[in-house]
Amino acid sequence: METRAQEAILLLQSLLREQTFSGEEGPTANLISLHLKKKGITTTRLYNNIIARNQHWSNDKPTIILNSHHDTVKINNGWTRDPFGAEIDGDQLFGRGSNDAGGALVSLITCFIHFYTAQLPFNLMLIASGEEENFGPKGVSAVLDSMDFEPALGIIGEPTQMHVGVAEKGLIVIDGVTTGKAGHAARDTGINALYLAAEDINWIKNHKWDKVSAVLGPVKTTVTQIQAGTQHNVVPDICSYVIDCRVNEHYTLQEVLDFLDNNTKATLTPRSLRWHPSGIDHNHPVVLRGQSMGRKIFGSPTLSDQVHFRCPTIKIGPGLSERSHTADEYIKLSEIEEGINIYIELLKGLEL
């Protein structure tokens, strides 16, 4: 295994040994900053986001952002290994956050170090960010909001088997409340708010959205929670439910919200309208370069820090999405080595 891959794996092991749930990433931020300092690279820090620029930065060049996150979700049941043990077993490195997105993070850091002193036709900015798993306000969105320039491209490190994610569904979480009138369950009195909600839910379940994306498929709306009633003999006057809406690039979040609002009886309140669908032109130079290297393109149903970028972005990284957040999560050492090499090859000769 190449020395740079070995260094990346050692860095990842040190990160995995720290407990860095979203909002608590201070220890891993310190480790990443120290790793870059040892390579002669100056960093800046905003909250627990570590930021670095390549040596030959020029305001006259377009900027590519290399971004992945170092926070993790909390430990779930079912682990048979120490989730903070960073144990290597054959080709597998185990630990919470190893696959999502430790492998991508250390591979992007290694790629950045490789190009740090190179003369490039573009700038490189590394952002090792926090608060991705909870979409907190102190993650990459805070860094992007603080910048005084618009990046040309974002490369987002997430487990994709090093295939190129060219689109990502947006998300709206909507709280719905139907209002009826309380009454005795034994009599024909009252208006059952639960029944009103059931009508809404049945409509949401059966509605087919017209505009289907070639890469993301249709909009998907799913009712995931419901709550009503205080006791068995009282007709409930309030029923609340939650809709999880995954939105393709053919609709704005507001369009989806308005359409649902016009076809349901509930009062609908979105928790956020910031998590937009994202995408990139399939003829963009970075997409064409990835395809020329034998990488497939795909649309992703899951959300990542792509949602915060307003420039074109791709999502690409070592690992397998299905391993994320699972017990005994792992990344393969060979996947990290491949990830580093593909990231470097992707940027070689790239012209924006």
Image: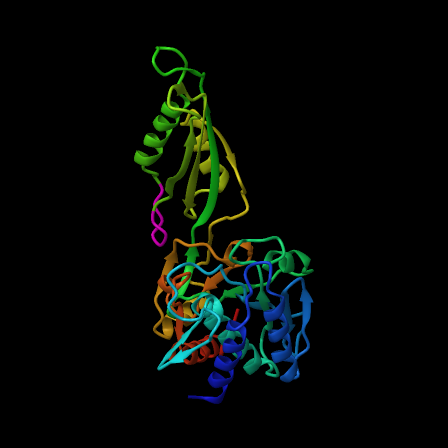
Q: Is residue 97 magenta?
A: no
Residue at image location 35% in from the left, 10% down from the top: 188
Q: Position of residue 106 (x, y in %)?
A: 51, 75
Q: Position of residue 90 (x, y in %)?
A: 35, 82
69 lies left or right of 92: right
Q: Position of residue 132 (x, y in %)?
A: 53, 58
Q: Quadrant of residue 281?
A: bottom left
User: In the picture shown, does residue 316 fall above or below 275?
Assistant: below
User: In the picture shown, does residue 59 fall above or below 74?
Assistant: below
Q: Quadrant of residue 339?
A: bottom left
Q: Position of residue 303 (x, y in %)?
A: 46, 54
Q: Is residue 199 visible to the viewer in this orientation of the structure? A: yes
Front-most of residues 78 and 198:
78
Q: Is residue 333 visible to the viewer in this orientation of the structure? A: no
Q: Residue furthest left?
A: 206
Front-most of residues 45 and 262:
45
How many numbered badges does the structure rendering display?
0
Taken as a whole, is the magenta stretch helix, strand or loop?
loop
Residue at image location 42% in from the left, 54% down from the top: 302
Quarter the N terminus occupies:
bottom left
Residue numbers of the magenta segment: 211-217
User: In the picture shown, does residue 110 fall above or below 73?
Assistant: below
Q: Is residue 213 magenta?
A: yes
